[in-house]
Image (spheres, grey):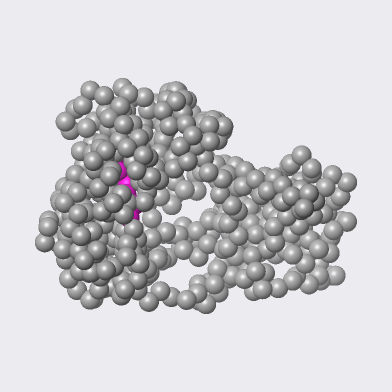
Amino acid sequence: MKPICKANQTIEKLLGPQIEDPAKTYRTANHCLAVKCEDGTLLFHTLTGMLLLMEPDEDEQMNRTFLLRNWFLVPDTFDEQKQTKDLRALLQTIQVKPNQITGFTILTTTDCNARCFYCYELGRKRTNMDEETARDVAAYIIRVANGEQVKIQWFGGEPLTNRRAIEIICEKLRESGVGFESSMVTNGYELDAKTAACARQDWNLKSIQVTLDGMEETYRRTKAYVDRPQSPLTVVLDHIDSALQEGIEVSIRLNIDANNASEMEQLIELLHCRFGGRSNLTVYCALLRAFTGKISAFASEQAAAEKVLELFQKLERYGFTKHKPIRTELKTSACMADNDSHEVIVPDGRIGKCEHYSETELVGSIYSSQKDRKQIQAWKEPVGTRKSCKNCPLYPRCYQLVKCDWTTVDCSESSRILHHAQLERQLLDAYENYKQEKQSEKRA
């Protein structure tokens, strides 16, 4: 048995070694994930972050003491869910709380130049942030950031349909000496070469996310741009090229349902021909979520997951994916919504906690020092355990909020299959890195 990655030091310290009780019988922990590799079996503890290699001539009994001390084996009646929940609660208690707010998602508008049929904002009021409010937003950021560097995500609607608000906020922050960088979620249609250059220089735009929905005809029909361009995909690809040339990190999200899945391989080929080898480009797949009930569903959750995995493998072959290291810390926050250092600012200056709620569930205003503490606390309530959680090895890596509309979707069968496959890939990558390091040590 070889240790490939050590346990997270904080978690290991808080748990301590497990002491064997001779009166009890033991089993493999639910939070132990086994993955076959060419040299044997990788064992990963999804709570502690420890990764081991069990070679073919070994079995659990040979290494029983070590596996038991490190929680890979637990008593038959042991409650792993409770262990995870208790540990997470302890970590949340001892974590240092932020003294200021340094992250902001700013909706410059709730209007958009597209009319995607699947958009969760359909039916909401379309409003722009006016120039006076933009100046007030900048003043608010300067006040609450208290001299710290800030990160801004421009959001909408389509944020570039009201770029004046972006310009004003960035100008005021620069004048005040507040350091900032920004990112943007955009459809890319307004991000021409001139805008990309301005965004990189004046808005300190580091990254963007752009969604593509298929080849030209499918993309045109899905986006349904209000000015009805004949070749919107061509326009957006040109604009992605402009952003890449400016050194902006671009993440392309391929939205998939049963209707467009058949042409996604062709779209990936197109992206490879156009952008292959660009180090600042990543591409990933995501299943459309049925908020409107209009998406074309796959025959089964399994079929949906298999299609995404097939496309992921193609993206991986073309170098469009970046391998992420294994996350060993226990997740104690779900997203911006339960993060005390992040706020969402909607076009009229009101403050929320989630970018998907621009009209309701708001917690305050940039014009008042008073915040709805009850609502803020409500955004921190985690989802309780479900039946599907009981034997799920991914449970320690999963943290969802009651108020989040995506909670049910994020725990669908297809989602679990995809998360499981992603983790397996990370474990295999970690083992390959381990072997390369050992070879380098031998050569040295």
Residue in front for this viewpoint, 119 or 155: 155
Along the line of sight, which residue is nearer the eye, 99 or 142?
142
Is 371 positioned to the left or the right of 135 in the image? right
Q: Nearer the viewer, residue 339 or 167?
A: 167
The residue sitting at 62% across, 71% down in the picture is 10
Image coordinates of residue 380 in percent, x first then y, are 41, 66
Residue 176 spot, x, y in % from top left = 23, 69
Membership of 424 in magenta stretch: no
Say how many tags the image has: 0
User: Does any portion of residue 86 appear in the rendered image?
Assistant: yes
Residue at image position (53%, 32%) is 318
**Magenta stretch: includes residue 185:** yes
Residue at x-position 46% and y-position 37%: 278
User: Which of the two residues, 192 or 315, is positioned nearer the viewer here?
Assistant: 192
Give x and y (percent) for residue 430: 66, 49
The magenta segment is 182-187
Q: Give the dominant element type of the magenta stretch: helix, strand or loop.
A: strand
Q: Is residue 145 above or below residue 116?
A: below
Q: Residue furthest front?
A: 444
Q: Is residue 310 above or below residue 253?
A: above
Going by the image, does 414 lie left or right of 392?
A: left
Coordinates of residue 173 in the picture (x, y in percent): 24, 64
Quadrant occupied by the N terminus: bottom right
Quarter-wise, where is residue 48 in the image? bottom right
**Residue 425 found in image quarter:** top right
Work out whether residue 53 can be spotted.
no
